Image: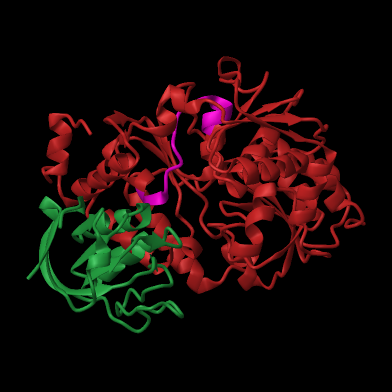
Amino acid sequence: MYLTKEQEKMLSGEQGETVERMFRLLVRLGEIYGADKMIPVSSVQVAGVSYKSIGDPGLEFLEDIAAKNTKVMVHTTLNPPGMDLLDWDKLGFPKDFAVKQLRIMDAFKKMGIMTTATCTPYLVGNLPHFGEHIAWSESSAVSFANSVIGARTNREGGPSALAAAICGLTPNYGLHIAEKRKPTLLVRVGVELKSNADFGALGYHVGKIVKDGIPYLKGIARAEVDQLKALGAAMAASGAVALYHIEGITPEAEKMAPSGIEAIDVGENELQEAYAKLNTGKEPDIIILGCPHASLKEIANLACKVEGRHMKKPLWICTSRTTKDTATKMGFTEIIERAGGKVVADTCAVVAPIEQMGYKTTAVDSGKAANYLPSFCKQQVVFKSLDDLLEGRTS
Amino acid sequence: MKGRMISPGKTKGEALVSRNPMSFYGGIDPKTGIVIEKGHELEGSCVKGKILVFPKGKGSTVGSYVIYGLKKNGVAPAAILNKETETIVATGVILAGIPCVDSLEIEKLKTGDKLVVDADNATVATE
């Protein structure tokens, strides 16, 4: 791989041991994946934040880096931790967990990372432009940035994203290169998608088939941004999809018109099959919405549906702190709380230790959460549209 | 034999060879360096100071941080040799500063071999 003189110096340790190792990591990953050079990035999203995911080894690593006064060079935001950073005690998060989680947040903050604590950085001030080179981890955000915005990022891991933030660089390979963004599978959608959950079910089905390829979806007449967020998250979870195109909707679809690639059809049967596979539980102990983190519009919608009613089961909607603050100003938080629900900030169903909080069956309207909850949180899952989840569970 | 440098450094030591892929998160105790993966051929062995040889990594990406933890706790292997170093192990050895070479014919190595590893030049020799 070609390195500039400046970059050679980084590798020889001239800027200290941390930069040397972080840059070596980028160079080695670049060589493994066939990169020709390094390119500057302007934005980073760092995953691997929950104490539940990274444990003591991760905590110690991050504290060591922070203690050496290492700072990030570019605008860097952070994924969700394993708890609500303010209301963890009230919500029943274990104390020993909270102490470790707060130490992790401090370490990131010390590095100059914005502790946004959300998987939807594009909703809270980390919004790249079309064609911009970025280095993001968090598979659902990667999918959104590549597909809906048309920015360019590979699926980074926690350490490689952190390395990109510290060095301001990423190896040039994969989705940074225009030709590597062409579709590999044509998906003809022959069923009307009525809810976020339908988009999640479609995403789950397509992700299983396309794996780490690039699907081109045809036959989706319209989609709200929140639905694209749900679709991409599910595809990234059941497969490893980092980029999808939708005819007439996503920005690169027009110039990426598929030719000579394999095609599949998805109809009502395939959609119902996806629902059947993801539904492993019967009556939920809790309903958790907001995977990926809910937008302000989704919180407003929930408030509208539960206003003046009372939930028979615990209900969480997870979102970023920024979005919750606005929802609170609008009175949505109060409406949801009066109905017995909670607007939980920072964390989410996937990275919170819900299995330690006494929950065995969780209901979700997210294809991503439905996919991960059985293994990450030992949950049985009820996966339905929001309307179906609320049906009969309010009074 | 000659391979490809993943992480630099020179060292020597006794080989500890696994014919199966290794998981670090939940596979090796970062405090003691003892292999704890149930049913693994190296279960109960300690990797401390050894030239740890295995085809490739497997399992959780948190394994990278476990490799870092092994080094920090003074129980890391002296070097790691692989058939193919995937990103979990590559990330771990680079962050920890453990010499690592891959693209090696590791079938020719066996536990107890005395090895000299020069990762800077991507070579492995018997002492």
Residue A329 figure quarter: top right
Q: Is residue A116 left or right of residue B64?
A: right
* Residue drawn at the location 44% of the way across and 31% of the way down: A175
Q: Residue furthest bottom?
A: B44
Chain in green colour:
B
The location of residue A341, given as percent across then percent down, is 76, 56
Chain A tint as drawn: red
Vertical placement of A277 versus A9: above or below? below
| Magenta-tinted stretch | A145-159
Q: Looking at the image, which residue sits at the far top?
A: A255
Give the answer, above or below, for where A221 lies relative to A85: above
Left or right for A114, reference A26? right
Instruction: Note whether residue A217 is visible.
Output: yes
Residue B35, position as x, y percentages in the image: 35, 78
| Residue at image point 28% right, 72% down | B17
Residue at 56% in and 33% down: A214
> Looking at the image, which residue is at 37% across and 61% down?
B57
Q: Residue furthest front?
A: B108
- Residue A153 counted in the magenta span: yes
Q: Is residue A383 within the magenta segment?
A: no
